[in-house]
Amino acid sequence: MRRLHFEFQRVAETVSRSFSQAIASLRASRTVSVALIALFLIFAGYAAAFVATLDQSIGSSVFYAVNNTVGIGLAGAGFYQLLARFVLRRRPAVAAVLHVPLAVAFALSWYLCTIVSFGLTPSWIRAGISVAPFGPVALAWQMFQGVTLYAALALFAYWRDAMARLESLRAGRTAATDQATSAPPPARETVGSLLVRCDREVVPVALNHIVIISGVDGYAEVVTNARRLLSTTTLARFEAILPLEQFVRVHRSHIARLGAIRHAEPAGNGKLLLHMENGDMVSTSRTGARALKERAV
């Protein structure tokens, strides 16, 4: 029954991770959809404003609306990447300082894109591009719009980052708990290997083949790239005999081999999400995250 319980829990965790990854991919594609919808609404607003306020044809109003919208799209795509790479994960005080020049740079970038696109008349190939700056009032209004749109872009970037962190945390969360109960100790490890007791047999496993060891209900699952072994030994016992220079307790339910960690990313609340070499993802505890960071050089 315990073996069935362990297998059921492992399958449930795998399904949960797959579902979370699918949701994350879907939401990533929604980012493009949200951006396109936002650009369409901006275009529609500009077109309606130009038609209502300017004494010109509908075609000219649409042309000017497209010019403004294209500039927003180009500037927004570039600055969204800057926010994601260099701003979002910084301390609030540092991020607040960075937002000021970025907001001004975004407004100027949009302004430059707009005045250049206005010069692309139907005869620009023969006559060239004639760039004319905005008047003082129009320029001030343009800059105000640019700073406002940058604020909206930054809020959207923070929201997407928060959702990504939440999905990463859900993907790596496990319900397993380790109850250190007595069990027959495994055979002592030989050089570079470990003898794992599985039911009535003992299976030798090379230490550098182990990816992670997870414990539940007095049992432990030894995961390698090739197979999964359910051992009757507790996780606490494995922690006591494994070499500290190769393995670290990252969670009360998980021991990870350092060499099997491909990379780690923040999972919120002081935790890390570990991407293992066999494709598994494991969420650390705050204590486990600190233990890993202490190993970093």
Image: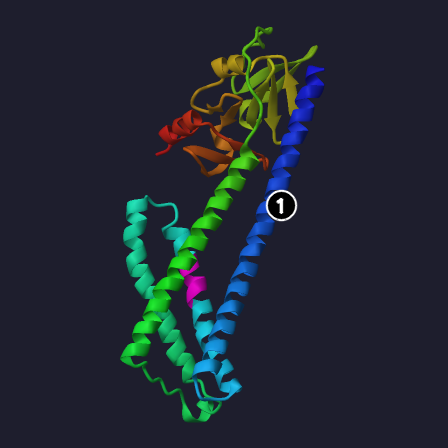
In the image, is residue 168 part of the stretch drawn in magenta? no
Q: Quadrant of the C terminus?
A: top left
Q: Quadrant of residue 281?
A: top right
Horizontal side of 59 relative to 142 (left or right) equals: right
Q: Quadrant of the N terminus?
A: top right
Which type of secondary structure does the marked residue at label 1 adopt? helix
**96 over 175 or under it: above or below:** below
**Looking at the image, which residue is at 55% across and 19% down?**
177
Asked if one can make out residue 8 in the rendered structure from this viewpoint, the answer is: yes
Query: Picture quarter containing residue 204?
Result: top right
Q: In the image, what residue occupies the spot 51% across and 14% down?
A: 236
Relative to the observer, which residue lies in front, 15 or 257? 15
In the image, taking residue 148 as reference, residue 63 lies left or right, namely right
The amino acid at mark 1 is: Ala
* Disc 1 target residue: 22
Task: Give the overall secondary structure of the magenta segment.
Answer: helix
| Magenta region | 75-80
Q: Which one is nearer the viewer's eye here, 68 or 247?
A: 68
Which class describes the residues within 10 Å of circle 1: few (<14), some (14-19), or many (20+)? few
Residue drawn where x is 32% and y is 70% of the image: 143
Q: Position of residue 73 (x, y in %)?
A: 47, 68
Residue 257 lies, in percent from the top left, at 50, 27
Please, is residue 58 above or below residue 92 in the view?
Answer: below
Horizontal and vertical percent for residue 258? Answer: 47, 29
Q: Position of residue 26 (x, y in %)?
A: 60, 51
As displayed, is residue 27 above or below residue 111?
A: above
- Number of marks drawn: 1
Give the residue furthest to the front: 52
Q: Is residue 276 visible?
A: no
